[in-house]
Amino acid sequence: MLEIRNLFKSYENKPLLRGISFSVSQGETICLLGASGSGKSTLLRMIAGLEFPESGQILFNKIDLAQTPPHARDFGLVFQDYGLFPHLNIFDNVAFGLKMRNIPAAQINSRVAEMLDLVNLQGFEKRKVTDLSGGEQQRVALARALAPSPRLLMFDEPLGALDKSLKEDLLNQIRAILHKTKIPAIYVTHDQDEAFTIADRILFLHDGEIIRDGTPDEVWTNPNSAWAARMLGMGNVIEGRMQNAEGRTWNVETEFGVFNVECEHKHLAGEKISLLLKQFPTPVFGSGARGEGDEIKLKVEDVLFKQDQFQVKLRGGLVIHLKDAPKVGQIIRVKVQVECLA
Ligand code: ADP
Ligand code: MG
């Protein structure tokens, strides 16, 4: 399906994307997760044909799209700000791409009705854009993108402007629609919750490169870098210094004690590294738990109520989650699993 090969792009001599490669298969939703300003929208605009890479290729079904103008690519786009035409009613918005393709009126009527049905806006044809809520407008935008049966759908932070409960609702609808239609999709966001809900595969965009590509389960179990671990809100990324090793197992000195850590990468004694301290047993999905875990003893600095558990802040900025609230000032013992992040 879609294949991106070694894309480079810079603005004002500042490199933004430095050799981006990935592919998207039929029926697959990939999620591009990156901080604000990391070049996510630029990458989507290049795939849409609205902007050009300095080098590299964009292929669809093995055909290079360099000479294919945006409208001929048959890709659908959904933006954060909906991008609806305010002077047109809902029918005309959804019908827009179909009219451009000179499809007969009767066929357009039934396709628009079908699409409004799909996004749960049956009978909204005559309504004005300005009379709809943000969530409804975004569903119209989705119906408009889907109407011409695009070969690929791209979402650029589509839920950014919506409040939390609406977000979840719409995200689940988008997920259901993507599964039903099997249209390959690229979903761009800086929100890890969204990424984990929608993605078959997550790609981390950092410093102009894709630094991690894997299923949600894989990247959660093994984020592979301090940046990815922080981006995923795993929180407890600490600094350490390599002391000595026995094979691949290093003694790593940290402010929380010396840990015995197995590292896949090559290291030198004295080297500074980042470690991930996971609460043990791991409370969220991911079954990477090995062995017994290490025990640390720390003072409770703050306790926050978080729905079904308490978020406990410990000395040194560590955060863990417990079913029962400890007292501030109390010393508690926590089992952690320590992983090397590079
Ligand atoms: P993201 O969508 O990840 O937030 P963008 O792709 O929008 O990131 O932008 C990445 C960077 O590229 C930003 O620093 C932005 O200022 C810069 N940029 C984007 N478009 C242009 C442009 N047309 N001219 C100059 N700089 C741009
Ligand atoms: Mg953007």
Image (cartoon, rainbow, N blue to C red):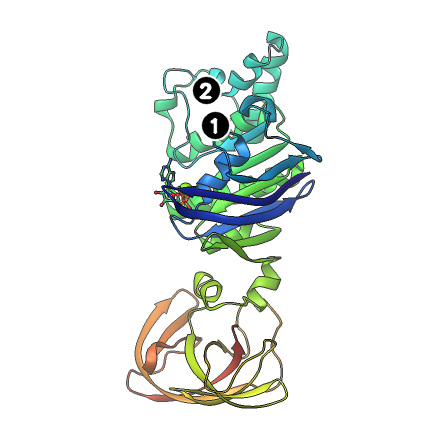
User: Residue at label 1?
Assistant: 140
Name the quadrant where ligand 1 sits.
Answer: top left
Q: Element at badge 2? A: helix
Question: Few, some or many C-alpha atoms within 10 Å of disc 1 (few <14, some 14-19, many ≥20)?
Answer: many
Seen as rendered, the residue at the extreme top is 105
Q: In this view, does 106 lie above or below 195?
A: above
Q: Which amino acid does label 2 sit on?
A: Ile
Q: Earlier in the sequence, mark 2 or mark 1?
A: 2
Q: Report which quarter residue 233 is drawn in.
A: bottom left
Quote the CA–CA distance across marks 2 and 1: 7 Å
Q: Is residue 198 in sight in this rendering? A: no
Q: Element at badge 1? A: helix
Q: Nearer the viewer, residue 318 or 25?
A: 25
Q: Nearer the viewer, residue 103 or 7?
A: 7
In the rendered image, the quadrant that contains the N terminus is top right
Query: Relative to 173, is 134 on the left or the right?
Result: left
Q: Is residue 340 above or below residue 33?
A: below
Q: Where is residue 118 in the image (x, y as percent from the top left)?
A: 58, 30
Query: Relative to 300, is 178 on the left or the right?
Result: right
Q: Which residue is drawn at 52% across and 81% down?
A: 338
Q: Are marks 2 and 1 in contact (CB under 8 Å)?
A: yes
Q: What residue type is labelled 1?
A: Val
Q: Position of residue 133 (x, y in %)?
A: 37, 32
Q: Is residue 109 in sight in this rendering? A: yes
Q: Position of residue 181 (x, y in %)?
A: 66, 35
Q: Is residue 301 above or below residue 204?
A: below
Q: In this view, does 298 lie above or below 170?
A: below
Q: Residue at x 44, y 61 (%)?
A: 231
Question: Few, some or many C-alpha atoms within 10 Å of disc 2 (few <14, some 14-19, many ≥20)?
Answer: many
User: Residue at label 2?
Assistant: 90
Q: Report which quarter residue 317 is drawn in.
A: bottom left
Q: Position of residue 180 (x, y in %)?
A: 66, 37
